[in-house]
Amino acid sequence: MGNEETTVSETFRTFGREIKPLIAEIRDAFVDRPVPIGRPASDFGRVANSWIGRTGDLRRELLQGFNALTTRVLSPEGGLSREEIRAAVAAYRVHIADAVGLFHEMWLRPFPAGIAEAQPLFSSIIEKILRCVLMTLEEMADIIDNPETAADKYGSTMIHLHASLDTEAEELRLNSWCERHRWSAKRRDLMLGFLAGVLFSRD
């Protein structure tokens, strides 16, 4: 959608309607974040290793899935029906639900004594990924619903078909915490391996 356009196609309107439940789902995820209760996991090292791998996988799935979704639905040659657009958005929603599930899982129980302060640092990476997706979807929905004010608000009415999930600051803060606290070598190696994988494999 360029600056010269004053009307919105039905394809864009359908897409805008279908992404609104995704926006609500991500917003609710932050409001409904669990309060940690009970005891820390007895096998915290294994759990942490699992979280690290899943965070990296979900980042790739959310990014690649979003780029594929918008390219397929919103590209000029798309020509998808309403049902096809709904199905495409529903398929992407699975990745969002998985990311929300992981974010909440990280907060279900407290971290072990001595590293409790790392809990928000640890979960901040998947949280930032979700916030990036949310911001992108909100902007797209706003441009579609209010093209006449979008140029003043965003500098353009252009909808970008590719998202960016920048978590470098969160990764570096977690890395810094590991360095300061000299976290156990095994766990720290797992963490740094994840950070390096994300930092050097950005799409």
Image (cartoon, grey):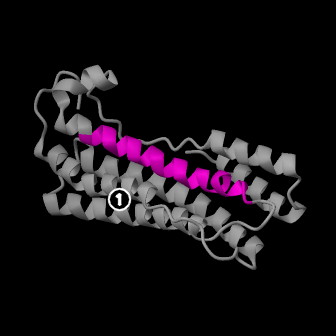
Q: Which type of secondary structure does the marked residue at label 1 adopt?
A: helix
Q: Quadrant of residue 87?
A: bottom left
Closer to the camera in the image, 170 or 197: 170
Closer to the camera in the image, 202 or 186: 186
**Quick check: 115 left or right of 147?**
right
The C terminus: image quadrant:
top right
Q: Residue at x 58, y 65 (%)?
A: 107
Give the overall secondary structure of the magenta segment: helix
Q: Residue at x 81, y 51 (%)?
A: 178
In the displayed structure, 154 sits above or below 33; it is: above
Rendering coords of residue 2 (x, y %): 23, 27
In the image, which residues are magenta? 116-141
**Quick check: 108 left or right of 157?**
right
Q: Quadrant of residue 185?
A: bottom right
Q: Amino acid at mark 1?
A: Glu
Residue designated by label 1: 25
Q: Residue at x 75, y 79 (%)?
A: 42
Magenta-drawn stretch contains 37 = no
**Quick check: 11 left or right of 92?**
left
Q: Quadrant of residue 44?
A: bottom right
Rendering coords of residue 36 (x, y %): 59, 67
Q: Residue at x 22, y 50 (%)?
A: 15
In the current view of this chain or complex, which residue is farthest to the bottom?
Answer: 42
Magenta-drawn stretch contains 117 = yes
Rendering coords of residue 92 (x, y %): 36, 60
